[in-house]
Amino acid sequence: QVQLVESGGGLVQPGGSLTLSCKISGNIFSWSSMAWHRQAPGEQRKLVAAIGPSGIANYVGSVKGRFTISRDDAENTLYLQMNSLKPEDTGVYYCTVRVGSLNSWGQGTQVTVSS
């Protein structure tokens, strides 16, 4: 069973930065993707960034050049570095790990971008 625990969210002013962390435990042997999703108020969850075992990352257009997804295999941790934050980046951020056909989710961490 895979368990994910996000941290690092908070309140930040527009233009500021935050780094989200996702501590991963359990058997993730042969994982196929890790990702961050965002759920804005009143909206569905949407993919923000994803990374594969090769290290190749993909981003939704609105965060390209501002967000960076990365992982530390030694620490079993997934990160999302967020720079130049905008009010529209506000939402609950969830990390996911896909192993086979199973996609595991964390409980989410709130990010609020506001002056």
Image (cartoon, rainbow, N blue to C red):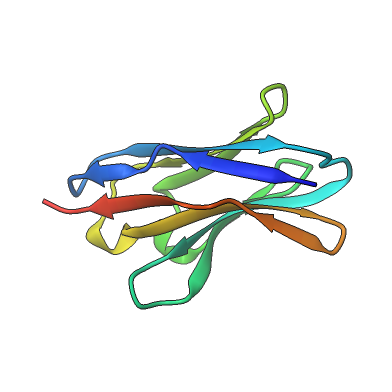
Q: Quadrant of residue 104?
A: bottom right
Give how far across and how far down residue 15 sits, in percent: 21, 45
Is 45 above or below relative to 58? below
Residue drawn where x is 58% and y is 51% of the image: 106
- Please tell me whether residue 10 is drawn above or below residue 73 in the rendered image: below
Question: Is 78 rendered above or below residue 115?
Answer: above
Q: Nearer the viewer, residue 88 or 67?
A: 88
Q: Position of residue 44 (x, y in %)?
A: 47, 76
Image position of 69 (left or right of 25): left
So how many labels did they put on this image? 0
Q: Quadrant of residue 90?
A: bottom left
Q: Is residue 71 left or right of residue 68?
A: right
Tell me the residue at 53%/52% (across/down).
107
At a point 46% along the width and 61% down the height, the residue shown is 38
Horizontally, residue 85 falls left or right of residue 74, namely: left
User: Residue 80: percent from the left, percent from the top?
Assistant: 49, 42
**Residue furthest toward the left?**
115
Residue at 39% of width from left, 48% of height from top? Answer: 66
74, above or below 15, in the image? above
User: In the figure, is residue 24 to the left or right of 10?
Assistant: right
User: Which residue is most to the top?
Assistant: 74
